[in-house]
Image: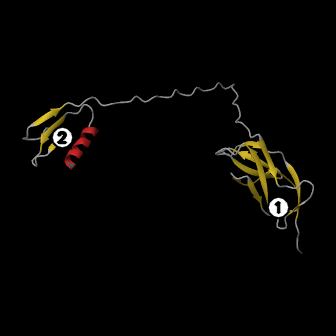
């Protein structure tokens, strides 16, 4: 049985143009080969044509003329910081606090959020709507959030919020 299975696999893997021979081996088992056996009677087997499927090629993308302007990716309808007081100082004794990000629709796969503190990128991009700031000095600051694409290019930025951090400094 095992030799018949091996022979069957041999039949499947041989090229379509190969000649196949069927014969009985010394143990009385039916065997198949692409070579006629020496000193044994064999029968030539005609194989039906192999099934083939033509691959469908997608047409090559057409290149845009140099004057064509690329349409920017759809922006988020809502992108804003939450959790920052506007009427009073933010009390953060060690300068560490969290801010939320309101974003609609949900953050798309591959896009990330990054804070902009006092006009400079702050921290590592993340894909969560809650971001932490650490050891921010006391005083007035500006903060915004950016949406970055997978290549770290800025897709969109929220309005900048101005706030004041109140810290207790011990002598």
* Protein image colouring: secondary structure
Residue drawn at x 15%, y 33% as measured from the top left: 44
Residue drawn at x 74%, y 38% as measured from the top left: 75
**In which quadrant of the rendered view does residue 132 lie?**
bottom right
Split into 4 quadrants, where in the image is the C terminus? Answer: bottom right
Q: Given this view, does label 1 or label 2 mark the residue nearer the observer?
A: 2
**In which quadrant of the rendered view does residue 21 lie?**
top left
Residue drawn at x 78%, y 43% as measured from the top left: 78
Q: Tag 2, which secondary structure?
A: strand
Q: Which mark is residue 32?
A: 2
Circles 1 and 2 in contact, beta carbons < 8 Å: no
CA neighbours of label 2 inside 10 A, class few (<14), some (14 to 19), many (20+) = many
Of 105 and 80, the residue lying toward us:
105
Q: Residue furthest bottom?
A: 171
Q: Residue furthest left?
A: 39
CA neighbours of label 1 inside 10 A, class few (<14), some (14 to 19), many (20+) = some
Please tell me whether residue 83 is drawn above or below residue 103 in the rendered image. Answer: below
Q: Position of residue 40 (x, y in %)?
A: 8, 40
Q: Position of residue 23 (x, y in %)?
A: 13, 40
**In which quadrant of the rendered view does residue 70 lie?**
top right
Of 2 and 137, the residue lying toward us:
2
| Mark 1 or mark 2: whose residue is earlier in sequence | 2
Q: Label 1 belongs to which residue? A: 136
Q: Position of residue 63 (x, y in %)?
A: 60, 27
Q: Position of residue 154 (x, y in %)?
A: 73, 43
Cα distance, mark 1 to mark 2?
80 Å
């Amino acid at each position: 049985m095992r030799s018949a299975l091996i022979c069957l696999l041999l039949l499947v893997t041989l090229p379509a143009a190969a000649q196949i021979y069927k014969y009985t081996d010394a143990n009385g088992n039916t065997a198949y080969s692409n070579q006629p056996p020496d000193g044994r009677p064999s029968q030539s087997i005609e194989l039906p044509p192999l099934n083939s499927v033509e691959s469908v090629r997608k047409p090559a993308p057409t290149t845009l003329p140099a004057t064509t302007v690329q349409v920017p990716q759809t922006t988020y309808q809502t992108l804003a910081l939450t959790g920052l007081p506007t009427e009073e100082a933010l009390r953060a004794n060690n300068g560490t606090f969290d801010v939320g990000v309101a974003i609609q629709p949900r953050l798309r796969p591959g896009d990330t959020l990054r804070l902009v503190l006092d006009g400079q990128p702050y921290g590592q991009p993340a894909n969560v709507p809650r971001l932490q700031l650490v050891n921010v000095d006391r005083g007035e600051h500006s903060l915004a959030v950016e949406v970055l694409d997978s290549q770290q290019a800025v897709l969109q930025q929220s309005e900048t919020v101005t706030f004041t951090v109140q810290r207790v400094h011990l002598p």
